[in-house]
Amino acid sequence: MSTSVLKKELHEAIDRISDLKALKSFHSIVTLVSGNGNESTLSEEQWEEVERRHSDYISGRVKYLTFDEFTHNINAFKKTLRKKNRARTARNRRV
């Protein structure tokens, strides 16, 4: 993929994003990579870890969740715990 095609696709993708957190995250990355921001405070080892995780994500070895997916999973887990606690409480009352 050529640089111009990639830039065009990025511009189009940015125009479709309405999530402020996502835009701020993307802005931070672009600012850091373009050299327009402050120097990174990450050590070389930390950068290697970031690059390893990114490589794992790109290759499909790991799946990261969006914030919405994460909160949905947490809420479902909490709901399950509440059900278990209610059942345990009901059992204890019968005894």
Image: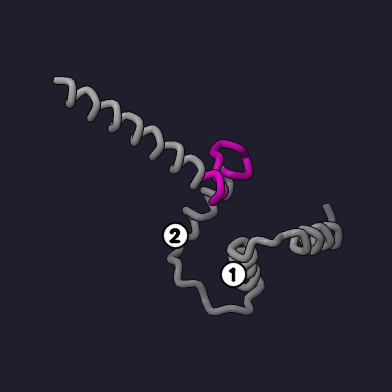
Query: Is residue 23 shown left or right of residue 64?
Result: right
Q: Is residue 58 one of those drawn in magenta?
A: yes
Q: Which residue is drawn at 23% across and 30% down?
A: 89
Q: In which quarter of the image is residue 80?
A: top left
- What amino acid type is highlighted by mark number 2? Gln
> Relative to residue 6, is residue 83 depicted above or below?
above
Q: Mark 1 points at which residue?
A: 28
Q: Distance between the residues labelled 2 and 1?
A: 17 Å
Task: Give the mark nearer the N terminus: 2 vs 1.
Answer: 1
Q: Name the residue under label 2.
A: 46
Q: Quadrant of residue 9?
A: bottom right
> Residue 58's spot in the image, x, y percent?
63, 44
Q: What stretch is highlighted in magenta?
A: 57-70
Element type at mark 1: helix
For this rendering, which residue is in front, 24 or 57?
Answer: 24
Q: Residue at x 46, y 63 (%)?
A: 44
> Residue 71's spot in the image, x, y percent?
49, 47
**Mark count:** 2
For this rendering, which residue is in front, 53 or 67?
Answer: 67
Query: Is residue 76 shown left or right of residue 86?
Result: right
Neighbour tally class for label 2: few under 14, some 14-19, many 20 plus, Cα within 10 Å: few
